[in-house]
Image (spheres, rainbow, N blue to C red):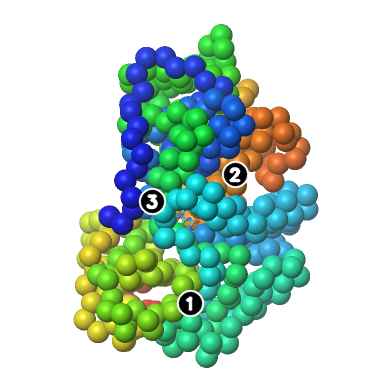
Amino acid sequence: MTAPEAPATTTLSGDVRADVAIVGGGYTGLSTALHLAKRGIKAVVLEAGPVGFGGAGRNVGLVNAGMWVMPDELPNVLGAVHGDRLLTLLGDAPAAVFEIVRTYNIACELRTEGTLHCAVGPAGLEELKAREAQWQARGAPVRLLDAQETAQRIGSNAYSGALLDRRAGTIQPLAYVRGLADAALKEGAIIHTQSPVSGVETASAGWRVMTGNGSATAPWVVMATDAYTQGPWEIIRREQVHLPYFNLATEPLPDDVRATILPGGEGAWDTKEVLSSFRMDARGRLVFGSVGALKGTGHAIHRDWGLRALHRLFPQLGKVKFEAEWYGQIGMTDDNLPRFHKFADKVIGISGYNGRGIAPGTVMGRTLAELIAAEKGEADLPLPVTTPQEVKMRALKEVFYEVGAQAVHLTDSRF
Ligand SMILES: Cc1cc2nc3c(=O)[nH]c(=O)nc-3n(C[C@H](O)[C@H](O)[C@H](O)COP(=O)(O)OP(=O)(O)OC[C@H]3O[C@@H](n4cnc5c(N)ncnc54)[C@H](O)[C@@H]3O)c2cc1C
């Protein structure tokens, strides 16, 4: 565990009153709480597990600018108004994360040197050329590196190029979400952990949000439960297909080896459909991830593949061991874009970040706070209001993701 401890929190008991009850203690919920509390609006966060139990505590740590969807494609999917707003918001989102980290002095291994989206083969390079042109047309500081510069920055000859995005960066994701919780508490928010919300009912003051031992009554409810949704409005989960993703962290590397891999401090991922990602943490541990769940038959298959792939990518590693491993579920939507939902009067939520939730979750939390504070209206939001739709054949699609990842990792058909 390389994250500082979470701030002390208690389980909810009795009835508490607030202006906003927030369900979910990940980036979205805690950023909403922080930005509400800064405005003097009383927010109470109810988290089923510990802070960061969901995607926030399990991810890679890439603070990306933008989504998977190509920049020029986004206005076609969302319409010009929402598309342009979302691109602007997400393009600036890493800077918002960096500012929060600096303002609240969050110890989360922040690196702001950018990210490298690495091209695998000619098809990967073509995709990145298009991304470069489309982002540059919007004034974004991105640059396509040739194979030689990519090899120097990555420490591997595996890639045909890479898109350097100077807006982006990396963090230790669990440390960041714990720091967000600390910042929200310092601004006056209340956080209750081990407090799963089991139901929401109408009350004279708006809504009563119930847990096993207590309740929170508030005019507003924010559902910030994303892929880990349980309890009320479980449709948030059923609107998504879960993509499993794992990370393996090596032991700290010797200084001479460490100096050859990502010497510039960027985070990296590649263009393959069954993608891989990697970043160097502050202790010199290489955190290497890919699609799959570290359980059942997948455990050995993904882990063994991870070792082989790392050696092929970075022969200089020599004998290396993993000292930590974890995995989680990424909530994918059918168009790879997040959703803004109104579940009932003054019950709202944003979810569906498609594996891009650190910076987007942070700025979407801020946006929800601005909406509740009436600084923005619904018409000003970066996403249209949509009704959640259950995905057809969800379970089958989820099996397909895992089986597909195991097949790729077993046959070793990469690099
Ligand atoms: C393995 C993995 C790798 C990823 N890598 C990256 C990355 O490199 N970069 C990036 O930007 N994003 C990444 N993501 C995605 C990112 O982690 C998520 O998009 C992000 O965590 C979403 O934030 P959130 O606050 O909306 O939801 P979450 O962080 O999932 O938090 C939701 C919380 O709601 C709680 N909850 C659910 N139901 C209830 C209930 N009834 N009562 C109380 N609490 C409840 C859950 O316990 C959970 O803690 C990755 C995700 C995974 C799983």
- Residue 415 relative to residue 271: left or right: left
Disc 1, SS: loop
Q: Give the mark count.
A: 3
Residue 234 in the image: state x and y as whole percent. Answer: 46, 33
Q: Earlier in the sequence, mark 3 or mark 2?
A: 3
Cα separation between marks 3 and 2: 19 Å
Counting residues from the start of the chain, the first of labels 1 and 2 encountered is 1
Q: Is residue 198 above or below residue 160?
A: above
Between label 1 and label 3, give the one nearer the viewer.
Answer: 1
**Is residue 212 placed above or below 329 in the rendered structure?**
above
Tell me which residue sits at (56%, 12%) in the image: 205
Amino acid type of disc 1? Gly
Q: Residue at x 76, y 37 (%)?
A: 379
Residue 109, placed above or below residue 18: below
Badge 3 is on which residue?
Answer: 174
Q: Is mark 2 within 8 Å of ligand 1?
A: yes
Mark 2: give few (<14), some (14-19) or many (20+) Cα within 10 Å.
many
Quarter containing the C terminus: bottom left
The residue that label 2 is drawn on is 364
Please provide percent x and percent y for residue 397.
43, 53
- In the visual, does 308 lie left or right of 216? left
Q: What is the residue that sits farthest to the top in this orientation?
A: 204
* Residue at which label 1 appears: 264
